Amino acid sequence: MQREVLYKPYEIEIKRLQRFTKAMKCNNFFELIYVTEGNGIQTVNKNRFNYRKGNLFLLTPQDVYSFDIISPTTFFFLRFNESYIKEKISKDKDAIQQVTYILHNASHRPGCILKNKADDALFAALVESILTEQTNQQLYYNRITEQLVNTIITVVARNIALKLPKKIKENTGEPVLEILHYIQQNIFEPKSLRADKLSRQFNISQTYLGRYFKKQTGDTLQNYIASYKLRLVETRLLHSDMRINEIAYEFNFTDESHLNRAFKKFKGMNPTEFRKINNAN
């Protein structure tokens, strides 16, 4: 299967289709696909999902996908590549976590990634604003479009964050979603993630906190924090040139050896081996 290539940092396209012309697609870039009208079936990596108006999909470079269109469908495509991600990270350190969420979504469950219902109208308005700027092309339209694209990525990051861990559903109670968001926002501050701190932050007794988190997510609190941190480490290894000791320092491991032991338990190999194998692939 031939991979499609994106030569610009990002690209916007809108298409109304009665059928998806290529049976299966595989890209070398990230692709957000928003359905403005129509319905049908999306297939991603052999998983099928019934799509409809208002659905948003994120396809990563690892994904193979197609659409079986039932009623004529208008798709909004936003494509962006590694150079756009690296430029965004270099300009805005706060964006690292947001971009990391997107990179992690390679393992997401199939289907629409808009989980925060309040974002449905917001995302539709952002898409409409981008299309208006692209159509009218008034003064500074490129700069405004890029700002809108960055806002879309932030909204996507928020919704991807709500998809983890696997037991979390759309109707999961709001408190545990707030706990997950707090953990993700404070993953670089271990003191903020201690059980006593979380207990005070969310007004849940320390003895009940662990049981509540396990019941809602299917995972223990400490294991989720450790696993989430190591997924971030994995992303640094795949998508940055940071040295192992720099990554260990960033994530508050005692030293490089401490990170090596934790990562080997998580992935079955040390960080250097993991990076070497994936770079070769």
Image: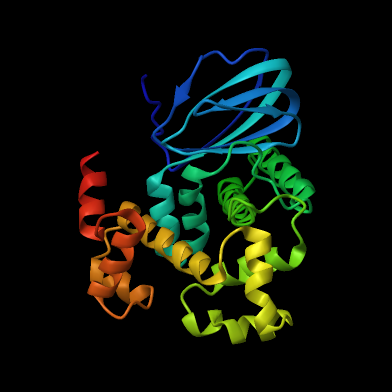
Seen in the picture, residue 130 relative to 143 is either above or below; the reply is: above
Residue 62, given in percent of the width and then of the height, sits at: 41, 36
At a point 62% along the width and 54% down the height, the residue shown is 151
Question: What residue sits 42% from the left and 37% below the top?
Answer: 61
Does 10 sit left or right of 134 as displayed? Answer: left
Where residue 120 appears, as percent x and y from the top left, is 76, 46
Q: Does residue 180 sit above or below 25 in this rendering?
A: below
Q: Position of residue 144 (x, y in %)?
A: 61, 51
The residue nearer to you, when weighing 157 against 48, is: 48
Q: Nearer the viewer, residue 90 or 172?
A: 172
> How many numbered markers are drawn?
0
Image quarter where the C terminus lies is top left
Type of colouring? rainbow
- Is residue 94 among what the camera can see? no
In the rendered image, which quarter is residue 242 located in? Answer: bottom left
The image quadrant of residue 240 is bottom left
Q: Which image quadrant: the N terminus?
A: top left
Q: Residue at x 62, y 65 (%)?
A: 214
In the image, taking residue 7 as reference, residue 24 lies left or right, namely right
Q: Is residue 272 above or below residue 107?
A: below
